[in-house]
Image (cartoon, rainbow, N blue to C red):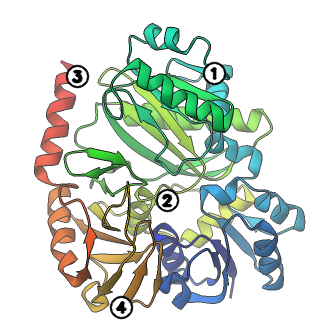
Amino acid sequence: MIKVLLVGGGAREDAICRKLVEDGASICSAASNMNPSISALSRGILVTKETDENSIFDFAVRNEVDLAFVSPDSALDTNLVDRFMERGIRVASPGRSAAKIETSKAFMRDLVDKHQIPGQIDHRLFTSENGLLDYFQELDGSYVIKPIGLTGGKGVKVKGDHFRTDREGLEIASKILRSDSSVLIERKATGEEFSLQAFCDGSHLSFMPVAQDYKRAFENDEGPNTGGMGSITSYDHSLPFLSPGCVEKAKSILKQIAGALQKDGHEFHGILYGQFMDTGSDTVIIEVNARFADPEGINAIFLMEGSLLETLFGIADGSLQNQMKFTNMSTVLKYVVPTGYGSSPKATELHVDYAKFPGNPRVYYASVNGSLSNVKTTSSRALAVIAMSAKIWDASEKAESSLSAIKGDYSHRRDIGTKESIERKTKFMETLRS
């Protein structure tokens, strides 16, 4: 039996783990928590920080794994993947230099500039406060403030959403400068964001269904940014509110980014994931990531028809042949999170009637410990409930009704994938296109 090392202990990794076991793999897992689902499926378990490359490397060597898949962004920002490759262990994740497409937002913008790839946004990197206020005005006061490195989806600040005045913007940018020595300022784009993920073997890409993440903590897209409260996909693998041709533009951009990385000596093997925005008149790059999205990656894995195990070997060996196939159904995922998630989360215990999640809907276990029936939450997301149906809003209702099987003090967004939510997005995009 093929032994696979899986690094990571969230719901995304639970989805990966279950699919790999279904494909016939034997799992050795390394994560910072004792995820009850991953633990139950693993032949070997290492509980440690996901950035503890020495312990994870030694664990993989001891277990004589045939393939490694390093999932979390923080672990990709270590030398772990490179050490696996030097050891001769096949790995379906990018090395540290290729992962800079995510771990350094400045690297990504520079790469797009250098290779004249479409979809670029006006931006400037600052290493001091000098010129910040002038640049705010140059962007007509419509801008986004970004730390260069990893922030777990919570570090970006948008004028008009997170703060109101340029003076407040200067304070936020100055704080980032003091901690990171640099800060990225970008023009704010208006439209609907969408996620496009692809398996990449260095030169070939196999695309997954387009998804959309619901980032804000509260309904109607209000409240602080989070790691993601839920996500949707549509039966046609696009989204009903997107402009004609925008997904094809995004695919072309990702192909060009993979080619640019290869040309510059950072050949990318892994999951290349672009966060794009449809502005009604163009498709622009918000960010590029080096791993499965969370939660959107779970939607894709849930719909996957072929072997993920074979695909990961194809990524590692540079031999992806065919486009992966996905079921033509819509999915809606809703995250169960501790009360106060996004600002001041409170750890708690939840009871899960696991028998009520036989397959559709399904529950995946995230940053929790305990058993399949009784979990202890951390300060992060707890459970991902996903459902499938022909229409997005029917999948939403199915996911919502299944939440009655989870008891305890928790929060979630009821509006993810509802008909009202989809109609609102559709009308908004029609206005932008008119």
Amino acid type, residue under disc 1 in the picture: Phe
The residues tagged by marks 3 and 2 sit, at their Cα atoms, a distance apart of 33 Å
Residue holding disc 4? 373
Q: Residues within 10 Å of mark 4 (few under 14, many from 20)?
A: few
Q: Residues within 10 Å of mark 2 (few under 14, many from 20)?
A: some
Q: Nearer the viewer, mark 3 or mark 4?
A: 4
In the depicted view, which residue is nearer to us: 344 or 90? 344
Residue holding disc 3? 432
Residue holding disc 1? 126
Residue holding disc 2? 324
Q: Which x, y percent locates residue 47?
A: 65, 80
Of the numbered discs 2 and 4, the one sitting upstream in the chain is: 2
Q: Residue at x 74, y 60 (%)?
A: 317
The residues tagged by marks 2 and 1 sit, at their Cα atoms, a distance apart of 41 Å
Secondary structure type for disc 2: loop
Q: Nearer the viewer, mark 2 or mark 1?
A: 1
Of the numbered discs 3 and 2, the one sitting upstream in the chain is: 2
Amino acid type, residue under disc 2 in the picture: Met
- Residue 107 placement, left or right of 120: right
Look at the picture and state if 219 lies above or below 19: above
Of the numbered discs 2 and 1, the one sitting upstream in the chain is: 1
Look at the picture and state if 66 lies above or below 115: below
Secondary structure type for disc 3: helix
Amino acid type, residue under disc 4 in the picture: Ser
Q: Nearer the viewer, mark 1 or mark 3?
A: 1
Look at the picture and state if 226 lies above or below 286: below
Secondary structure type for disc 1: strand
The residues tagged by marks 3 and 4 sit, at their Cα atoms, a distance apart of 47 Å
